[in-house]
Image (cartoon, rainbow, N blue to C red):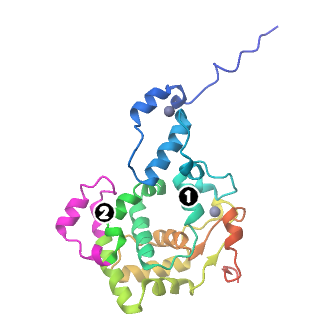
Amino acid sequence: MTRTRAKGPLRRRGPEAEKPASVWHRAHPMPVRAALDERLVWHAEHLKHCGCRPVPASLRALVQPARRPRCAWAGTDPLMIRYHDEEWGTPAHDDRRLFEMLILEGAQAGLSWSTILRKRDGYRRAFARFDPTRVAAFDARTIARLMKDPAIVRNRLKIEGAVKSARAFLSVREEHGSFDRFIWGFVGGTPIVNQPHGLRDVPAQSAESEAMSKALMKRGFKFVGSTICYAFMQACGLVDDHAADCFRAKRTGAVHAKRRDE
Ligand SMILES: [Zn+2]
Ligand SMILES: [Zn+2]
């Protein structure tokens, strides 16, 4: 007769699980007067590694969002989930927000989006709350200071690119009245709703993003390749790529939306 091994203690666990919670705590002091995003991330990590103190009531819904069917890319990171639930695919028409997303999508190139979300407050501080007029006026000294700011991606091309894009943004606004009017022209003013079935069904670019990319490059914008433009279109709701089974898809499949195959 062979004896069955007890499952508990012999079960394989990840290296993190073997570390006592006190080790985790020493390496991760609780952020006190930090931005909301930073506190969210801390509490979510704390729940994974320890959980000795409850999540404050004010943060609970954000740290432990309701389990709902979502686009797979949203994963379990509370910042990604919040971004997915509240922003991604929602039509944006405010010039400042459009400028913010254009700069953040460009900053992301080569990095993960969750990295950018963790730096978003830093970006807002470093880039004058994404006021394009102020960013357009950044001089060499400001750029040198930003190159030392750990709250943003310290990449000279990206920082200088953002300043050039701000200048181009102002000239588009001058020419078209608003950046909003100009950029929504690439989709005829109405969101394109794709309702993809799973991640592999989501395009990385489209004819519209290609046209947008060419137009922006011609006007002197930087970090505006077709893929970045497509990500911008998804972020600002020019394209709605919420998966068919995502809870956000049902709400946005509105009367005014047109489908690509129409
Ligand atoms: Zn703890
Ligand atoms: Zn979704």
C-alpha span from label 1 to label 2: 23 Å
**CB of mark 1 within 8 Å of CB of mark 2?**
no
- In this orientation, which residue lies closer to the viewer: 100 or 159? 100
Q: Residue at x 76, y 14 (%)?
A: 4
Residue 224's x, y, as percent? Answer: 41, 72
Q: Residue at x 30, y 59 (%)?
A: 155
Residue 235, compared with residue 114, is above or below; it is below
Task: Tell me, yes or no, if residue 77 can be seen here.
Answer: no
Q: Amino acid at mark 2?
A: Ala
Residue 165, compared with residue 2, is above or below; it is below
**In the rendered structure, which segment of residues is drawn in magenta?**
133-161
Residue annotated with mark 2: 126
Q: Within the image, what quadrant is residue 146 found in?
A: bottom left
**Is the C terminus in the top left, top right, bottom left or bottom right quadrant?**
bottom right
**Secondary structure under badge 2?**
helix
Is 140 inside the magenta-drawn segment?
yes
Residue annotated with mark 1: 82
Q: Is residue 1 left or right of residue 163?
A: right
Q: Amino acid at mark 1?
A: Arg
Residue 110's x, y, as percent? Answer: 42, 57
Q: Is residue 211 left or right of residue 248?
A: left
The mark nearer the N terminus, 1 or 2, is 1
Q: Residue at x 46, y 55 (%)?
A: 112
Q: Residue furthest left?
A: 141
